[in-house]
Image: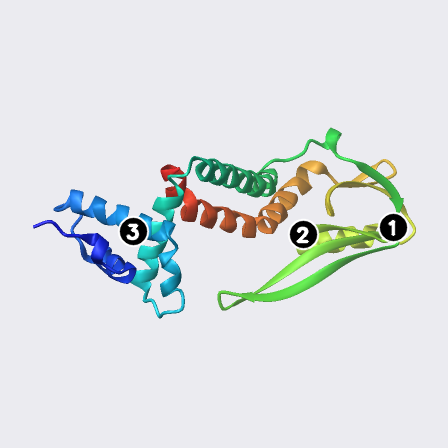
Amino acid sequence: MEVNYTKYSYQELLEVKGVIDKQKYPERYQRLLNEIEIRIKNGETSTIENSEMDDDDSSVLWDSLVVYNFKNRYFRIAFGLFYALVSVALLTQILPAFFHTKLANLPAYETTVDNIECKQYTFKQDGKNYTEYDLKVVSYGFTFYVIDMKASTCKNTANRINKGEKVTIWYDGDLIYQLARQNDVVLPYQYLKRYVWHAKVNNSFSFIIGFILFVSTFFDLLLIA
């Protein structure tokens, strides 16, 4: 006996789609999908917008909309471009954190120190107390940092350089890659680059999580496109 889905309401079609055995009745399932697409195209979905829908109904409606929209060639192209652009934008924030800029390619800022100090921060993580030492150099309103240094190195550096002393700072953003005064390299590039790497990775952590969530959420749709 052949089922006539044209006599079903849109809500009933969604309920049938949630329980039908599509492996056992593939032709019937396809006719059901075709009828749902027709109802969506005719705007019948508006009749259930104000009704209470459980999670299964919402999932069925989403699946139906996806099936219908992805049959549109321009929609598939637009979605592919959207996916590519967002992915590239996130990767441009993530990938630079994992690569070091060579010292020769870094800007060197010759300046006078207005203030230099070793800042101590205490914070709790996973139920444990941690202490972090950051070197902070201020000059003409600009602030540069070395994040999470060894306590002794941080304090010694702050004591070695005086206010008003001329220094050269090789930097990326607000992170110090090398610090020197006259002919004396106080903090060399080879020593500081690991601290820069650690700080950059921590700063990009939210972008990494966002990228993983974005890819995992929309990858199946990309395959359909």
Q: Between 105 and 146, which is closer to the camera in this rendering?
A: 105
Mark 1 and mark 2 lie on one chain; the one further toward the N terminus is 1
Type of residue at label 2? Answer: Ile
- Secondary structure beneath dot 1 equals loop
* Image-based side of 220 in relation to 32, left or right: right
Q: Marks 1 and 3, how far apart in space? A: 70 Å
Picture coordinates of residue 96 (x, y %)? 61, 38
Above or below, comparing residue 120 to residue 175 in the picture: below
* Image-based side of 205 in relation to 108, left or right: left
Q: Residue at 32% x, 67% y: name it.
A: 54
Q: Between 194 and 32, which is closer to the camera in this rendering?
A: 32
- Tag 1 near tag 3, CB within 8 Å: no
Picture coordinates of residue 169 (x, y %)? 80, 41
Q: Marks 3 and 2, how far apart in space? A: 57 Å
- Tag 1 near tag 2, CB within 8 Å: no
- The residue where tag 3 is placed is 36
Type of residue at label 1? Answer: Val
- Secondary structure beneath dot 2 equals strand
Picture coordinates of residue 146 (x, y %)? 71, 49
- The residue where tag 1 is placed is 113
Mark 1 and mark 3 lie on one chain; the one further toward the N terminus is 3
Q: Between 166 and 70, which is closer to the camera in this rendering?
A: 70
- Tag 3 near tag 2, CB within 8 Å: no
Q: Residue at 75% x, 58% y: name it.
A: 118
Give the image quarter of residue 91. Answer: top right
Q: Nearer the viewer, mark 1 or mark 3?
A: 3
Type of residue at label 3? Answer: Ile
* Image-based side of 183 in relation to 104, left or right: right
- The residue where tag 2 is placed is 147
Picture coordinates of residue 62 (x, y %)? 36, 54
Residue density around tag 3, few if under 14, some if 14–19, many if 20 or more, within 10 Å: many
